[in-house]
């Protein structure tokens, strides 16, 4: 479950990178952009899992907003980077 934090705001570039990651890694591939103070935007993709399930988990854990399709979701979340890292480590 690769998890990256970047300082990019171009959603097309981030979406393309998530697509690249899903070709190399099973599980969820996530890229977050933002900061602890203002929250994070995210795009999460997978070639093997239903990302809508991840959207539900993020909503339950952090009140995340967003949605998408089985192969890819996007949205926003107010949480600290450390909290998100711990959350994704538990998925492994």
Image (cartoon, rainbow, N blue to C red):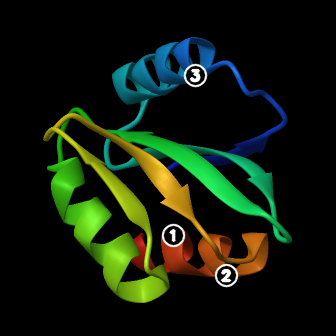
* Residue bearing mark 3: 11
**What element does badge 1 sit on?**
helix
Q: Which of the two residues, 9 or 27, is positioned nearer the viewer here?
A: 9
Label 1 vs 3, first from the N-terminus = 3
Q: CA distance from mark 2 to mark 3?
A: 23 Å
**What element does badge 2 sit on?**
helix
List x then y, in percent, for residue 92: 42, 70
List x then y, in percent, for residue 34: 77, 50
**What element does badge 3 sit on?**
helix
- Is residue 85 toward the left or the right of residue 16 in the image? right
* Residue bearing mark 1: 88
* Residue bearing mark 2: 83
List x then y, in percent, for residue 41: 60, 48
Furthest residue toward bottom: 61
Label 2 vs 1, first from the N-terminus = 2
* Residue 88 higher or lower than 6, as above or below: below
Residue for point 13% across, 41% down: 70
- Mark 2 crowd level (few <14, some 14–19, many ≥20, 10 Å Cα): few
Residue for point 86% across, 71% down: 37
Q: CA distance from mark 1 to mark 3?
A: 21 Å
- Is residue 81 toward the left or the right of residue 50 in the image? right
Label 2 vs 3, first from the N-terminus = 3
* Residue 85 higher or lower than 44, as above or below: below
Q: Nearer the viewer, mark 2 or mark 3?
A: 3
Q: Which of the two residues, 13 or 26, is positioned nearer the viewer here?
A: 13
């Amino acid at each position: 479950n690769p998890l990256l934090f970047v300082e990019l705001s171009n959603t097309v570039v981030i979406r393309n990178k998530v697509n690249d990651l899903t070709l190399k890694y099973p599980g969820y591939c996530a890229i977050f952009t933002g900061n602890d103070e203002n929250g994070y935007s995210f795009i999460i993709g997978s070639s093997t899992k239903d990302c809508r399930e991840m959207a539900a988990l993020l909503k339950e854990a952090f009140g995340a907003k967003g949605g998408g399709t089985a192969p890819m979701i996007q949205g926003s979340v107010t949480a600290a980077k450390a909290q998100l890292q711990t959350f994704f480590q538990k998925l492994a």
